[in-house]
Structure formats: structure tokens, C-alpha cells
Amino acid sequence: MKKIILFFKKHPIIKHLIFIGLVAEILIVAVLYSLDIYTRHGESIRVPEVQHLQVDEAKELLTHYGLRCEVIDSVYVDDVARGAVVEQTPKEGSSVKENRIVFLTINSNLPRKVSIPDVRDMSYRQALALLEGVGFPQPEVEYVASEYKDLVLDVVYNGVSVERGLKLPISTRLKLFVGSGVAEMMGDSIAASSDSLGEEWME
């Protein structure tokens, strides 16, 4: 023992290096142990399903499971109760740590409104693609006499012609008056009859 003490006295640098190594090892073990406790290694919580619940109900259920929630967006869905949860992230059944935030998207109390694009003098196919592109459902169609077949002549809501840029709820079902091409066909028939009568008269 005395030899060891004498050795360290003669070589103080070695003594300091050994001491530093021991301290470093203790610190590493302590940090790893602390991290294991902090992150609750091996422990997880299954996220419950909160879709279709009201926000208060969802919050209460998530709190019961040791989770938090935050509303990040709202959408409008016809067949879901107003204020109910439409989507959740993480999904139900996901394994998460305690105190994790579950992000919620809820159903808006009022439908989103969108400006109606001007689809008059467009083909029906173009008008349909444009209206559905901004979110409107497929419109009702009524064909009317016109020499221009499948040309949109008017856009109507509740029996009233709508102006371009008017904002209506996204769930609104519009009505399009579309040309049937009948007038053009009738014009051709009249012209053909006139030509026939002219030929008979000349004979």
C-alpha cells in the first residue's frame, strides 16, 4: 500500500488521470440513469380514439390517459356534429410517452365560404371541373334551348342568377343552365325544308 502511495506521489499526473477517468465514468452513468428516468424508458401510452367527440370530451379523455391536446385546424363536414373532432394526430392506438400533445382538427360550426367562379360561356365539362376544383359539389343541370350545345348559359342558386365573386358556403349545390343545341338543329331543319320547297317550286 505504501508503495502505491509513494508511486502516486512520484507520478502525480497518473493520479490525476485516474481520478479524472473515475469522475467521468460516474458522470456518464449518472447522465444515462437520469435520461432513463426522464424519458420513462420502456413506458408508453396507447392513444385513445377521440374522433367524433366534442373538444371538451376529447380533452377530458386524453387527460385521463396522461396526454394533452391542442386544436390546430377546423374544417366543415356535413355528416359530423359541429365542434366534434374530425381528425387526430397521432392516430388512435399509437404508442406515445406520457404528456404527449395530441393535435386535433375539429368540425367548424359554419361552412367555409368560397367565391363562385364565372363559368358562363364555358363548356359544361370545363365549368364542372372549375366548380368542383374550388370545392363545390356537382351542380344540378337543366338543359335549355340554345344553338350552342353544352355551353353554360347561366349559374343559379335558389332560383336567382348569381354574380361572379359571390361567396357561398362550400356545401352549396348550384344549378347550371346548359345549352341543348336544339335551336341549332331546328334551324338546320327549317333551312333544309326551305331548300326542298325551293327546288319543288323551280321544277
Image: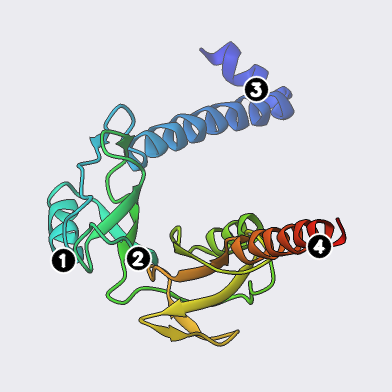
First in sequence: mark 2 vs mark 4: 2
What is the CA distance from the residue labelled 4 to the residue labelled 3?
A: 137 Å
Residue drawn 29% across and 59% down? 69
What is the CA distance from the residue labelled 1 to the residue labelled 4?
A: 87 Å
Q: Amino acid at mark 3?
A: Phe
What is the CA distance from the residue labelled 1 to the residue labelled 3?
A: 69 Å
Residue drawn 22% across and 68% down? 82
What is the CA distance from the residue labelled 2 to the residue labelled 3?
A: 78 Å
Residue 52 position in % (x across, y down): 19, 53
First in sequence: mark 1 vs mark 3: 3
Q: Is residue 133 left or right of residue 30?
A: right
The residue closer to the viewer here, 125 or 146, is 146
Label 2 sits on residue: 76
Label 1 sits on residue: 56
Within 10 Å of disc 2 (Cα), the crowding (few <14, some 14-19, many 20+) is many
Image quarter where the C terminus lies is: bottom right
Label 3 sits on residue: 8
Is 43 located above or below residue 90 in the figure? above
Within 10 Å of disc 3 (Cα), the crowding (few <14, some 14-19, many 20+) is some
Within 10 Å of disc 1 (Cα), the crowding (few <14, some 14-19, many 20+) is few
As drawn, the label of residue 6 is: none
Q: Quadrant of residue 63?
A: bottom left
